[in-house]
Image: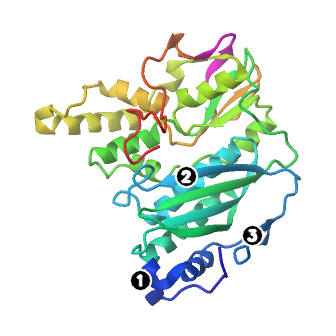
Amino acid sequence: MGARGGRPGRNQQDQTLAGVGEFGLIAVLSAWLPPGPRTLVGIGDDAAVLAVPDGRVVASTDFLLEGRHFRRDWAGPADVGHKAAARSLADVAAMGAEPSALLVALAAPPDLPVSWARELAEGLAAECARAGASVIGGDTARADQVVLAVTSLGDLAGRAPVLRSGAAPGDLVAVAGPLGHAAAGLALLTAGITQNPLVAEHLRPAPPYDAGPEAAGLGATAMIDVSDGLLADLGHVAEASGVLIGLDSAALRPGDRLLAAARAVAGSRRDVSGGRTGRVARPADDEALRWVLSGGEDHSLAATFPAGTLLPPRWKVIGIAAEGHGVVVDGQPWTEAPGWDHFRGSPVAGPASG
């Protein structure tokens, strides 16, 4: 990003991106993105300089695409900022690292209001602050729709990275954070139900960033963030580690909030055209369990630990690793889609998810 400037006045905020131009936009964004303690050179030069106490950098990149990962008629700009930061920072935490910085490239239509971009920056900054990170640079470009490409950086603080490939037979499988809440929020939005707290959990997932370094300190053998669906993501761990992961459905039983949301969604479908929506009816409890197992986008952390590890309360044991391959639920293969696949598509996510 270009030169840093003071916070824009109200008249400037009411303009469009075309009105302020590229460098005016950069000034707006940088004014709302404070540097972090590790930032030696921030926004305003050709590249940023970041202090790396460990000597190693954990890095990950994510896209956030309008019409695929969010819709502007559903999500406000601050929501988009929170989500863009959370998606990428959760990947760093899943390696056992402490999130430290983001690089954000923004492409947007020229008629996008500058105030939208400012609120986007506020959302980015707020989620970074929750994770202990900051935005240190990026780029801007013109596009027909809003596109964000976000690169996150993290510090291992002397720990070994936790990979997907370290799980062994006998390991406990545990999760920190909610499951199915983001998928429930998407289903509610799709059904036209907006007054439900689960909608906010879809729009602004809140990964437990500090659970990643915590898991590494507890001796986690493998870890991943739940972005595409619990079954799909644990499938990556099972494949990389060469183990079978067996999940216990009793430990994954949907809570009251998910069950109520599933019933509300089912009720809305019955109200459409006398109940003829073109979708196969599904009992609400089954729908809620499907959100838990294959919904994704909560960005909670799933990890494996050596047998006998004493886990803090926020880590819930949901299964065990064994000899074999793949993921099973109560000893049986899951017969539906395990989660989201960006190129094949999936019934798990609608056009606003990914």
- Residue labelled with disc 3: 47
Q: Position of residue 19 (x, y in %)?
A: 44, 84
Label 2 crowding class (10 Å Cα cut-off): few <14, some 14-19, many 20+?
Answer: some
User: Is 263 situated left or right of 314 in this image?
Assistant: left
- Frontmost residue, 258 versus 71: 71
User: Is 287 situated left or right of 341 in this image?
Assistant: left
Question: Of helix, strand and loop, which one carries label 3?
Answer: loop
Who comes first in sequence, dot 2 or dot 3? 3
Residue 325 on the magenta segment: yes
Q: What secondary structure is the magenta-colored segment mainly? A: strand
Circles 2 and 1: CB atoms closer than 8 Å: no
Q: Position of residue 155 (x, y in %)?
A: 79, 52
Question: Of helix, strand and loop, which one carries label 2?
Answer: strand
The residue under the point 81% across, 47% down is 156
Label 1 crowding class (10 Å Cα cut-off): few <14, some 14-19, many 20+?
Answer: some
Q: CA distance from mark 2 to mark 3?
A: 20 Å
Q: Position of residue 278 (x, y in %)?
A: 20, 31
Circles 2 and 3: CB atoms closer than 8 Å: no
- Frontmost residue, 114 versus 308: 114
Give the vertical position of 141 relative to 114 (above or below): above
What's the residue type where badge 1 is placed?
A: Asp
What's the residue type where badge 2 is placed?
A: Phe
Give the label on residue 76, or none. Answer: none
What's the residue type where badge 3 is placed?
A: Ala
Q: Nearer the viewer, mark 2 or mark 1?
A: 2
- Residue labelled with disc 2: 63
Instruction: Give the residues in magenta.
Output: 314-326
Who comes first in sequence, dot 2 or dot 1? 1
- Residue labelled with disc 1: 14
Give the vertical position of 48 relative to 3 (above or below): above
